[in-house]
Image (cartoon, rainbow, N blue to C red):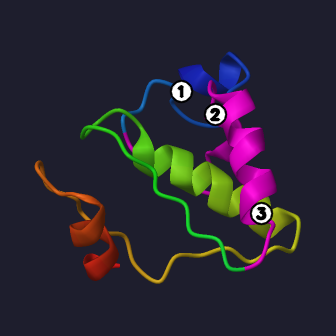
């Protein structure tokens, strides 16, 4: 209830990944997001989002996904690949 009184629909400090319902809470990386949105609007493009666990890679991907869906560009990955330490480009490509 306290978050609504401060103008938020949900807890802005949640560590859960951004969802369609909490998209307005996403902050940061605007320039990177805009670049990625332009690239993803092109046909036959794959984008790798890399980062350690807990740094927001899923939220960033969800931000891109939902933003493009709102523009009627239906980007949705078939699956997410969990990359392990020591992987190289060939391992990534084989896994995707």
Q: Nearer the viewer, residue 1 or 54?
A: 54
| Residue 41 in magenta stretch | yes
> Which residue, given by chain and number where applicable, does mark 1 sit on?
12
Q: Nearer the viewer, residue 92 or 79?
A: 92
* Residue depicted at 45% across the width and 24% down the height: 13
Residue 87, image x, y percentages: 17, 57
Discs 2, 1 touching: Cβ within 8 Å: yes
Residue linked to disc 2: 25
Q: CA distance from mark 1 to mark 3?
A: 22 Å
From this viewpoint, is residue 17 visible? no
Callout 1: helix, strand or loop?
A: loop
Residue 67, disc? none
Q: Which mark is residue 68?
A: 3
User: In this image, 52 relative to 6: left or right?
Assistant: left
Asked whether the residues under the numbered discs 2 and 3 touch, taking CB atoms below 8 Å apart as contact, a structural biologist would say no
Residue at 66% over, 27% down = 4
Please, is residue 79 above or below residue 47 in the view?
below
Badge 3 element: helix
- Verify whether residue 45 appears in magenta: no
Q: Is residue 78 left or right of residue 7?
A: left
Query: Dividing the image into 4 quarters, which one contains the C terminus?
Result: bottom left
Q: CA distance from mark 2 to mark 1?
A: 6 Å
């Amino acid at each position: 209830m306290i978050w609504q009184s401060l103008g938020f629909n949900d807890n802005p400090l949640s560590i859960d990944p951004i969802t369609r319902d909490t998209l307005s809470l996403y902050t940061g990386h605007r320039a990177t997001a805009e670049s990625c949105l332009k690239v993803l609007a092109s046909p036959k493009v794959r984008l790798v989002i890399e980062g350690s666990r807990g740094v927001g890679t899923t939220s960033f991907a969800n931000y891109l996904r939902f933003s493009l869906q709102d523009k009627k560009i239906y980007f949705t990955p078939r699956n997410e690949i969990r990359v392990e330490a020591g992987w190289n480009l060939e391992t990534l490509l084989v896994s995707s």
